[in-house]
């Protein structure tokens, strides 16, 4: 199949960027989207041009590196996928495809489609952990966690940190990302001990990074490759109110 | 060079306790004078960095990804083994030790493997304390499943994302130390050289991938935790960025490489669909618990899977290995698949796959149960192939997956360079010639959380006296100059072929000649071929842009340059081992039934290789494997 | 306290609390207004008595101050939130994100602005007139707000304005109610589901209830049904 691409090119973080047109004539419909990008880059290099820089690594939807806007949607038109799991069979022959980086003030563009998501790391740093040192923890089965609680905690913990929630949010809110970690840990007895402190520091850091407010449009849940529920946001809100009110 | 594995004296079950009781310690006040560099933030790197920082050592942690959370440990699906015996089905540390050793075809050290099994108990406790949401029974107790190569249920899992959950646990511990100021984390930094001062590892040269700056970092010990190099085959289950560069640069500075050719080819991956393909996605081995593997009895079968009647299907694993059946270890399953595919019974458009069939499981357990167990894997399968595995069997084929080989390390996980440690998949240690499923997460964690923190202290205690390393030392100057020269060399070629082109060529050659089966003729041809390819690489490569900017092609080219050297060593390694063991199958050494024929008389050793210079043949230093506590047996799964 | 004032979550909590109070007020308001649907002879006395009761009672007065505060706080907080959100975002060259959310959930600010303009008109025409203007007395001696209301809906465009504003209100509530409950932290999947259904019914009831009154008044007094 043939496709026409309009890809965001930007030399570095300070440069002005723009959409640049590219045509690919022989695209196999079973190619993944990133393999299509590889093909384009191969051609660009051989023509003496600089290839399109984009984040990617595992190419199986779990590392969370490959964030990009495809046709104006985070990770492309299919829900529940990362860009690397998207295949060209989802597009029509002759289609025009827009490719842009995930955008938010908190996610500066480094080059082309590569972005800086270190704000997420700083949110986790601020409290997204259980303060358990390596050493001699208690026997695992002394801490009973029901099947349902473990599954529910897993649902929140499945976040891959790709940033699609921020990219698709009209306010660039990081509420889904932050709340997923807060909920994961608050749902488990070993995480409850620090729950109040955690939610206060993580929300404060989230705000300091410059993300917007959550408007509950639920777009994030739709575009989350792991289908993380917006109810995590409700839990974060509740935990936050509780912690803020009861703080010494 | 005489290799000393430094195995402690005493009975097998007391060796590690004995070591811990007698290892040197560093007083808490002195630890902050002993900085440590950790390369890689996967399970072994993050766990090591976090544990060392908790103890008070200033840690500098590096990863090439944009976040420590993206290291490829994240992709491990199935689970992590531990001899907890929660299922009361006869498991024990000794049995796990024996299974692992046997699974590795008796090509690993008894003491290391025993320690792995022993520490597996604490690892589950550790992970639970960190909040890893392992699967639970309804009453709240931890749940287990069975995995290939063993007859007990000892695998702990978090749905199909166990690696992700364990990694997040380690990552979170690491980030906690970063916030406390105990770890300086350098994401988007790639180690390009190791710096030795007076023969000891004292620092690294790294490239900041966001600016292109070449930077120097000094420390009193360096830990390499960069994972495996299975990506050398180009088509593999590994991430695009996985590479062998850190270990290779260390190797060229004097660290021996052990058994580099022992690569696990995973039996349950998605087959290649076209030449454009960049990776082969792994489908968790846990699928083999309920899935049955078969091919048609007729060669060149044209009918769809569901149209082939039961009696015309060949369940070849059940036929050849009745007691383990579909749960036969990975090397055996992969080889059996290759045997059928090569004999013309492969299925799929390229006839390069075998069927993995769930129809019986669905019939016996019901759709709901199968969905609950494997739902996410089935949906992943559908996302990639657009096929519905509930309705028709999956098509799977083997793909390069795990490097059992790596930097040679002693019992303390120290390489032959003093002060240079290697943990996790980057080292050669515990898996022998074949790794059992769900042992890789285990080894990575155990190395980082429970072993290195003791053994590195034993080394660092000796580094307290004497001058501390600084980046102003002339050795840093020299190493930085070499790094710049190599980068400029790659940029200056301005040829007509991309790094990927050479990588694909190399991968094909290596998979054919040094993959699932090897022969002297093939390996010799591969060595010549690789040497030629390397020449072509340095005359025909094209790398766009400059070294002073974000440049993924330059990163790739550097990695491929190293692969082109590693590949040759792999072939030498495979050629010198004139026996079949585990993943290493030499066509010349097999039984009449086509099973691996081990030669304990001559090859019961670890092949450790020394770098002797560019285009010079490597030198072999065998480390004999001594078995005091078990008898070597024929590894039979029939 | 600093946390409560400065956090994005707290700002949203203020939106939610003031919004839900306004939701509660709307119910009271609607119940009072439904008296206009009674036969004219009964409606007049009943409605005027009720209006007088609301303006005279000290308890109701206190509630009304909460109401005024809620209106102002809801609007000002919305402005603060919007300004900050604008700072957080970066524009896409090609944007099709609208596929994955409801238009009214993304445009609460526009809907809210429409409501604000409507409220100014609404306050001027009824509240201001009743409090500070000259209103004739009915036969019981109460200010005859009933007549004021009836004559207000004489012109069809004024009726249309009201119906349009009520549609905006409806969509504002459709998202606002659910969003408020989410913001306040109801995370239990089952109860969150119930509340969502309740919010849906509530929004429809308020919209339909407030919309039929001007239409009914117009048609019965000045239109076809007269």
Image (cartoon, helix red, strand yellow):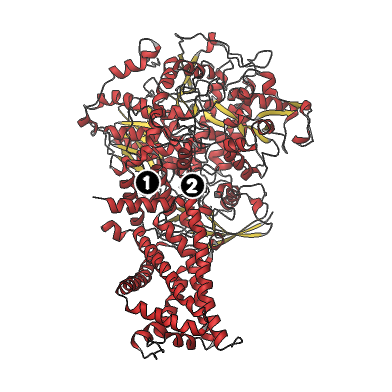
Residue B340 position in % (x across, y down): 71, 26
The answer to whether marks 2 and 1 sit on the same chain is yes
Q: Nearer the viewer, residue B539 or B175?
A: B175
Residue B92 vs A120, above or below: the answer is above
Residue B540 vs B459, above or below: the answer is below
Residue receiving disc 2: A65
Residue receiving disc 1: A124
Identify the residue shown where x is 49% and y is 62%.
C199
Residue B33 position in % (x across, y down): 23, 33
Mark 2 Cα-neighbour bin, 10 Å: few <14, some 14–19, many ≥20:
many
Q: Are marks 2 and 1 in contact (CB under 8 Å)?
A: no
Q: Nearer the viewer, residue B292 or A215?
A: A215
Residue B212 position in % (x across, y down): 41, 48
> Quadrant of the rendered structure where residue C100 is?
bottom right
What secondary structure is marked by label 2? loop
> Quadrant of the rendered structure where residue B460 is?
top left
Q: Nearer the viewer, residue A38 or B285?
A: B285
Mark with earlier residue (2, 1): 2
Left or right: B320 in relation to B260: right
Single out the mark in the foreground, 2 or 1: 1
Residue B448 vs C42, above or below: the answer is above
Mark 1 Cα-neighbour bin, 10 Å: few <14, some 14–19, many ≥20:
many
Residue B175 position in % (x across, y down): 35, 42
Quadrant of image for the N terminus of chain B: top left
Quadrant of image for the C terminus of chain B: top right
What secondary structure is marked by label 1? helix
- Tell me the chain of label 2: A
How many angstroms separate mark 2 from mark 1 (CA)? 17 Å
Q: Is residue B235 visible?
A: no
- Tell me the chain of label 1: A
Q: Is residue C165 visible?
A: yes
């Amino acid at each position: 199949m043939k496709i026409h691409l309009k890809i965001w090119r930007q030399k570095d973080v300070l440069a002005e960027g723009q959409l640049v047109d590219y045509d690919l004539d022989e695209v196999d419909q079973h190619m993944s989207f990133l393999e299509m990008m590889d093909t384009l880059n191969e051609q660009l290099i051989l023509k003496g041009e600089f290839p399109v820089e984009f984040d990617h690594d595992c190419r199986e939807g779990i590392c969370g590196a490959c964030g990009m806007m495809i046709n104006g949607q985070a990770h492309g038109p299919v829900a529940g996928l990362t860009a690397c799991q998207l295949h060209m069979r989802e597009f029509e022959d002759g289609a025009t495809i827009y490719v842009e980086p995930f955008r938010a003030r908190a996610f500066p563009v480094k080059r082309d489609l590569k972005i800086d998501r270190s704000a997420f790391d700083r949110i986790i740093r601020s409290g997204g952990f259980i303060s358990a040192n390596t050493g001699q923890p208690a026997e695992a089965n002394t801490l009973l966690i029901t099947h349902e609680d473990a599954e529910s905690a897993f649902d929140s913990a499945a976040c891959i940190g790709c940033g699609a929630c921020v990219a698709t949010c009209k306010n660039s809110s990081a509420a889904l990302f932050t709340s997923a970690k807060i909920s994961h840990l608050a749902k488990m007895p070993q995480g409850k001990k620090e729950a109040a402190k955690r939610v206060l520091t993580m929300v404060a850091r989230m705000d300091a990074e410059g993300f917007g407010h959550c408007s509950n449009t639920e777009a994030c849940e739709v575009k989350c490759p792991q289908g993380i529920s917006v109810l995590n946001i409700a839990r974060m809100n509740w935990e936050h109110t509780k912690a803020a009110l009861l703080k010494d | 060079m005489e290799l000393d594995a430094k195995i402690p004296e005493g009975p097998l079950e007391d060796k590690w306790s004995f070591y811990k009781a007698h290892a040197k310690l560093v007083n808490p006040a002195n630890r902050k004078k002993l900085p440590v560099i950790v390369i890689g933030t996967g399970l072994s790197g993050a766990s090591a960095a976090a544990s060392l920082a908790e103890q008070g050592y200033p840690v500098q942690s590096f990863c090439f990804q944009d976040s420590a959370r993206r290291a490829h440990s994240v992709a491990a699906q199935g689970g992590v083994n531990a001899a907890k015996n929660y299922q009361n089905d006869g498991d024990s540390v000794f049995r796990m030790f024996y299974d692992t050793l046997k699974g590795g075809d008796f090509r690993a050290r008894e003491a290391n493997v025993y320690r792995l099994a022993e520490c597996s108990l604490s690892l589950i406790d550790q992970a639970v304390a960190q909040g890893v949401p392992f699967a639970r029974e309804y009453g709240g107790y931890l749940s287990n499943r069975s995995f290939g190569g063993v007859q007990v249920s000892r695998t702990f899992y978090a749905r199909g994302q166990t690696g992700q959950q364990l990694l997040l646990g380690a990552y979170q511990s690491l980030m906690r130390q970063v916030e406390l100021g105990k770890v300086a984390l350098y994401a988007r930094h790639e180690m390009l050289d190791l710096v030795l001062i007076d023969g000891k590892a004292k620092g690294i040269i790294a490239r900041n991938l966001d600016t292109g700056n070449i930077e120097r970092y000094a420390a009193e010990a360096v830990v390499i935790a960069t994972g495996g190099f299975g990506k050398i085959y180009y088509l593999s289950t590994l991430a695009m960025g996985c590479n062998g560069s850190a270990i290779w640069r260390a190797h060229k500075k004097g660290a021996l490489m052990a058994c580099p050719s022992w690569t696990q080819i995973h039996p349950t991956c998605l087959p290649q669909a076209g030449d454009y393909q960049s990776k082969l996605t792994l489908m968790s081995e846990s699928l083999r618990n309920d899935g049955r593997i078969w091919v048609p009895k007729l060669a060149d079968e044209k009918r769809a899977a569901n149209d082939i009647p039961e009696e015309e299907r060949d369940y070849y694993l059940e036929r050849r290995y009745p007691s383990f059946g579909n749960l036969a270890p990975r090397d055996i399953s992969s080889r059996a698949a290759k045997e059928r595919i090569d004999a013309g019974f492969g299925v799929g458009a390229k006839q390069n796959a075998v069927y993995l069939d769930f129809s019986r499981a669905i019939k016996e357990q019901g759709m709901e149960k199968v969905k609950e167990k494997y739902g996410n894997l089935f949906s992943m399968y559908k996302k990639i192939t657009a096929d519905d595995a509930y309705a028709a069997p999956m098509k799977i084929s083997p793909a390069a997956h795990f490097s059992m080989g790596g930097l040679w390390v002693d019992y303390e996980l120290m390489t032959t360079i003093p002060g240079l440690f290697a943990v996790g998949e980057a080292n050669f240690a515990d898996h022998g010639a074949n790794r059992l499923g769900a042992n890789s997460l285990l080894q990575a964690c155990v190395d980082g959380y429970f072993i290195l923190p003791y053994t590195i202290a034993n080394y660092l205690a000796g580094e307290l006296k004497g001058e501390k390393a600084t980046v102003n030392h002339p050795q840093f100057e020299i190493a930085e100059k070499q790094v710049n020269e190599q980068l400029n060399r790659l940029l200056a070629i301005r040829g007509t072929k991309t790094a990927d082109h050479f990588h694909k060529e190399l991968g094909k050659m290596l998979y054919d000649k040094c993959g699932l089966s090897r022969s002297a003729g093939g390996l010799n041809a591969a060595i010549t071929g690789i040497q030629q390819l390397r020449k072509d690489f340095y005359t025909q490569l094209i790398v766009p842009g400059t070294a002073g900017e974000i440049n993924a092609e330059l990163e790739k080219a550097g990695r491929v340059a190293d692969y082109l050297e590693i590949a040759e060593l792999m072939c030498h390694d495979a050629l010198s081992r004139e026996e079949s063991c585990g993943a290493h199958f030499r066509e010349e050494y097999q039984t009449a039934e086509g099973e691996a024929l081990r030669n304990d008389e001559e090859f019961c050793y670890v092949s450790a290789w020394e770098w002797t210079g560019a285009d010079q043949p490597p030198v072999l230093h065998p480390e004999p494997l001594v078995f005091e506590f078990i008898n070597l047996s024929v590894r039979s799964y029939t | 306290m600093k946390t409560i004032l400065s956090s994005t979550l707290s700002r949203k909590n203020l939106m939610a609390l003031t919004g839900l109070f306004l939701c509660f007020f709307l119910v009271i308001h609607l119940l009072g207004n439904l008296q206009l649907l009674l036969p004219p002879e009964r409606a007049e006395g009943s409605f005027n008595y009720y209006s007088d009761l609301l303006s005279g009672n000290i308890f109701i007065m206190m509630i009304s101050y909460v109401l005024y505060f809620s209106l102002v706080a809801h609007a000002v907080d919305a402005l603060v939130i919007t300004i900050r959100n604008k700072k957080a975002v970066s524009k896409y060259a090609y944007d099709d994100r609208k596929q994955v959310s409801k238009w009214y959930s993304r445009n609460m600010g526009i809907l809210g602005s429409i409501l604000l303009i409507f409220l100014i008109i609404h306050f001027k025409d009824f509240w201001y007139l009743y409090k500070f203007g000259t209103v004739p007395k009915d036969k019981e001696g109460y200010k005859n707000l009933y007549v004021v209301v009836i004559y207000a809906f004489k012109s069809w465009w004024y009726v249309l304005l009201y119906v349009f504003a009520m549609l905006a209100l409806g969509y504002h509530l459709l998202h606002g109610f659910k969003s408020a409950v989410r913001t306040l932290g109801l995370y239990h999947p089952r109860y969150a589901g119930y509340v969502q259904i309740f919010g849906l019914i509530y929004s429809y009831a308020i919209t339909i209830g407030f919309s039929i009154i001007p239409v009914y008044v117009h048609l019965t007094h000045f239109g076809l049904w007269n």
